[in-house]
Amino acid sequence: DRGYDDVKFFNHIEELHQYFLIRGTSKRNVMEKRKKINVFEYAKRYKGKIATKIRIKGMEYDAKITVKLVKLSKVKRKLWLIICWTDADIEEPLKIFFTNAKLDSKEGVLEWSRRYGERWKIEEFFRFKKTQMEMENFRVRSLTAINNILMIQLILGIR
């Protein structure tokens, strides 16, 4: 999801009638009373209403989540902003996410928040492949070739 906090992407996925969950960046602004405000500054006003536990890098944290319906400049419809705080967070929320899924219940908010946690394991695996297995240095183009090289490396434990 990195790099996809983009107005064109939001509108394109909306046109496809698909749901998305995208991590917001610190550069994103939301509209409030016809003025732009940085999303992290906006998030600081809301310290969380829904208590839950989250796992990040093998550690479990107590977290509080708030959701707000927000308008982004040039995005066709309003999006839900999910703000996730932990007790360790002092200055900024742990994560912020945008989604176009309807979040009208506590269960829905928790479900969409957990989805990102489930995806995080995949992100960690990609980072491992890039750094430890030097996958970015391969000069193959087909998915089959990439999968074959990855499988050989995983089996033999080589870099």
Image (cartoon, helix red, strand yellow):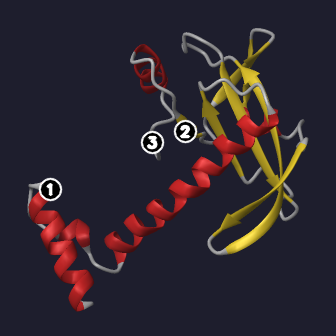
Residue 64 sits above or below residue 21 on the image: below
Q: Residue at x 9, y 55 (%)?
A: 142
Quarter where residue 102 is shown: top right
| Earlier residue among tags 2 and 3 | 3
Q: Secondary structure at mark 2?
A: strand
| Earlier residue among tags 1 and 3 | 3
Nearest the viewer among 130 and 157 is: 157
Residue 144: where, in percent of width, then height?
11, 60
Amino acid on which the number 1 mark rests in the picture: Leu
Residue 65 sits above or below residue 117 on the image: above
Tell me the number on the disc at residue 3: 3
Q: Secondary structure at mark 1?
A: helix
Does residue 159 appear anywhere in the picture?
Answer: no
Amino acid on which the number 3 mark rests in the picture: Gly
Locate the C terminus by quadrant. Answer: bottom left
Quarter where residue 107 is shown: top right
Categorize mark 1 by other alpha carbons within 10 Å: few (<14), some (14-19), many (20+).
Answer: few
Tell me the number on the disc at residue 22: 2
Tell me the number on the disc at residue 143: 1
How many marks on residues?
3
Q: CA distance from mark 2 to mark 3?
A: 9 Å
Q: Residue at x 39, y 74 (%)?
A: 128
- Between disc 2 and disc 3, the foreground one is 2
Q: Residue at x 72, y 21 (%)?
A: 70
Amino acid on which the number 2 mark rests in the picture: Ile
Residue 147 sits above or below residue 49 on the image: below
Q: CA distance from mark 2 to mark 1?
A: 25 Å
Furthest residue in direction front, as rendered: 107
| Earlier residue among tags 2 and 1 | 2
Residue 158: where, in percent of width, then height?
23, 89
Q: Left or right: where does residue 156 sit relative to residue 44?
A: left
